[in-house]
Image (cartoon, rainbow, N blue to C red):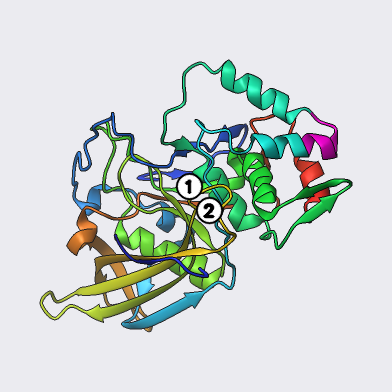
Amino acid sequence: MRILSARGAYAARLLVITGSLSSLIAACAPPPEVRWMEAPSLPSPSQAGHPATRLWGDLRVSPGVVEVDTGSRPWSGYWFPLTGGESAPVLSKYDLASGRKAREWFDASRSQADRPALPWEGRCDAWAMASLVIPEPRGPLAIGNVTFEVWEQQALWIHAFENISLGSRVILGDRNLGDGTSDFNDLLPMEFHKILEQVLRHENRPFILDRDPKPPIWNTPIWGARWEIREDRNRPGWMAVSTDLYGVLPLESARAPSERRTVVLHYEYALRVEAARGGPFRVIDSEWTGSSRLDHPDFVTLPKPGTLEHRSENPEIDVEWLRQNLK
């Protein structure tokens, strides 16, 4: 993956699990004290799984250029590292407005943690999901005698998405844990492209992408794409694909000016095809090419259509209160 520009207005298995709530907190930057294997293995693509194919059927393509804009713009918010207390003043204001004790619980939980949080641990996943499903705050909001700035409204929503029902989301692909046992190549290019076709183009909705296969999770909300498919003159039966994804980056600080930080992610891959009667070519194999061989998406997270069940790690943050008051 190459990041072409940033800034501006901006699984091997199918994991579909129902039941309990699961924490979304994950790494937001590489841990310097950990040395992982970036490419523990590069298996033949035929050995990997086909999660998108299992959901939606075979991928069929035709040469040409496709541009997709879902019309939905996720917002940039801060990732709120676990080592910091940037959201503590916001929780105090929330308590004044709601009558709860979120700040008290927050302070106690930090002092009683089982282990100190590492500098790279934060709420990237919570921000990414909230930015997909919660309308972007547009300005200061007064609730009684308390006024919440845009970043403070975002902070409350990000806390509210720290846990999400496993039955409310679909994960395609497995995270590379960096321990030498994870499949570095499990999300095949043909599966990745099927997700683009199905979710962006046909369902017209954004999704969350872990944008490279290294162990830290860099969740990036994706709202649009452009791809070009052409016949590979050097390899009969193969087509070369160049894809740009349009996504949103988190803010660099909690109180940063409200803006949408846009990123363009570039990937290249090849699709092996066979002729299909009366229609586009059927894809039967694929491989990452160029720099994407070692730098391609790790996994994709999709919120299921309908109500998304979620809550905060902080039991004093009432999600229903947020829904009623942060409008």
Residue to which mark 1 is pinned: 171
**Dot 1, crowdedness within 10 Å: few (<14), some or many (≥20)?**
many
96 magenta-colored: yes
Question: Is 28 placed left or right of 43 in the picture?
Answer: right
For this orientation, the residue located farthest to the left is 234
Q: In the image shown, does 306 or 291 lie closer to the viewer?
A: 291
Q: Which mark is residue 111?
A: none
Question: Is 195 placed left or right of 169 in the picture?
Answer: left
Kindly indicate whether the residue at mark 2 contacts the one at mark 1 (C-beta within 8 angstroms). Answer: yes
- Point out residue 281 in the picture as x, y percentages from the top left corner: 32, 76
Question: Is 217 placed left or right of 253 in the picture?
Answer: left
218 magenta-colored: no
At 64% from the left and 23% from the top, the residue drawn is 107
Q: Can you tell which quarter of the image residue 192 is in?
A: bottom left
Q: Is residue 308 visible?
A: no
The kind of residue tagged 1 is Ile
Helix, strand or loop for the magenta stretch, by majority: helix
Calculate the distance from the C-alpha at mark 1 to the C-alpha at mark 2: 6 Å
SS state under label 2? strand
Quarter holding the C terminus?
bottom right
**Dot 2, crowdedness within 10 Å: few (<14), some or many (≥20)?**
some
Q: What stretch is highlighted in magenta?
A: 94-100
Question: Is 76 placed left or right of 209 in the picture?
Answer: right
Q: Can residue 75 be seen in this view?
A: yes
Residue to which mark 2 is pinned: 302
Relative to residue 75, is residue 94 depicted above or below?
above
At 34% from the left and 54% from the top, the residue drawn is 297
At 64% from the left and 51% from the top, the residue drawn is 151
Q: In the image shown, does 68 or 55 lie closer to the viewer?
A: 68
- Point out residue 319 in the picture as x, y percentages from the top left corner: 75, 41
The kind of residue tagged 2 is Leu
